[in-house]
Image (tube, rainbow, N blue to C red):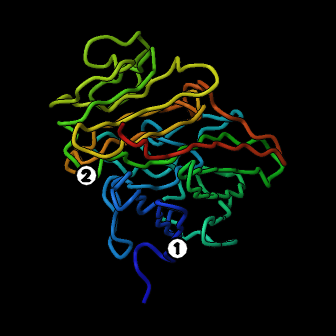
Amino acid sequence: MTTPGGDVLTLTAGDYRATVVSVGAGLAGLTWRGGHVVVGHDPGELPVGYLGKTLVPWPNRITDGRYEFGGETHEVPVNEHETNAALHGLACWVDWDVASATDEEVTLTTDLAPRYGYPFWLRSTVTYRLDAEAGLTVSVTSTNLGDVPAPYGASSHPYLSCDLAPVDECTLTAPGARVLEVDERLRPVGLRDVDGDLDLREPRPLGARRVDHAFTALPDGGWAVTLAHPGAPFSARMTADAPWVQVYSGEKVDRRGVAVEPMTCPPDAFNSGTDLVVLAPGEAHTLTMRIDAVPTA
């Protein structure tokens, strides 16, 4: 029987266990010593809030589903009607092919053929590699198979969790020094320095605060976002070197985790051009991130 998750693959290494699904090349679970490091989902059910999905060829949103590139206007389907945006790319609900699988590593791949709104040909590959010491490393690589340049961005959508403890009881550390302000439709309106509730550069109790923002001006050489809970035996940590990170306080998952999405570009980059990757014919781009459990001393 075919399920919403497609093929289900289990990785094990030391005290870690990860579940990967082929639909959306998604992360359906990650545990350490049985405790949930991310908010997982049943592979037999349609996940809420884009849990663990791979986001290509753009992360976040394209305002009004419309952008210009190469002197032409393109329109992609709007799938978030309350904001009238095209959200999270084209591959979240594609059943990716399993290219290889072992007990500790799985690679999935899919081709994004040219279509109305995105007339470019990409091959995307996602590798999940589990290590007993380093935790889970995720690499997202896309190659332009076409003969014209292609606009591109990438991310992944895991929700860090301290064994599903309420995030209201957690502290969050996110090092971005600048934040992208948005309007009521979540359209970018400008960058500003972080302050008040959005200054998360030092550990801050989340309490009832709501966050759904893209941060930049991140430390050179890589950065870490950490979620900690006083009663948990570990903190959940995401490390990457992407120029942007979206942080979302997880209302769609009942605030049992915080979405941490390393992004190669900010929301609506297909219109602003900010940090937009333009893949030349034959060119490839790789985004790498790591999720691990940091034992509590």
Q: Residue at x 46, y 67 (%)?
A: 19
Q: CA distance from mark 2 to mark 1?
A: 22 Å
In the depicted structure, whether residue 163 falls above or below residue 212? below
Drawn side of residue 99 relative to residue 169, left or right: right
Residue pushed farthest front? 297
Q: In the image, what residue type sits under mark 1? A: Leu
Q: Nearer the viewer, residue 173 or 157?
A: 173
- Residue 225, by quadrant, is top left
Q: Position of residue 158 (x, y in %)?
A: 42, 49
- Residue 125, by quadrant, is bottom right
Tag 1 secondary structure: strand
- Considering only order in the chain, which callout, 1 or 2, is on the residue closer to the N terminus? 1
- Residue 230, by quadrant, is top left
Q: Nearer the viewer, residue 265 or 129?
A: 129
Residue 264: mark: none
Which residue is tagged 2? 164
Q: Residues within 10 Å of mark 2 (few under 14, many from 20)?
A: some
Q: Residue at x 48, y 59 (%)?
A: 92
Which residue is tagged 1? 9
In the depicted structure, whether residue 246 falls above or below residue 6? above
Q: Position of residue 189 (x, y in %)?
A: 40, 18
Drawn side of residue 129 relative to residue 205, left or right: right
Residue pushed farthest left? 208
Q: In the image, what residue type sits under mark 2? A: Leu
Q: Position of residue 243 (x, y in %)?
A: 58, 27
Q: In this view of the protein, can residue 99 be seen by the observer?
A: yes
Q: Position of residue 170 (x, y in %)?
A: 24, 35
Q: Nearer the viewer, residue 158 or 1?
A: 158
Q: Quadrant of the C terminus?
A: top left
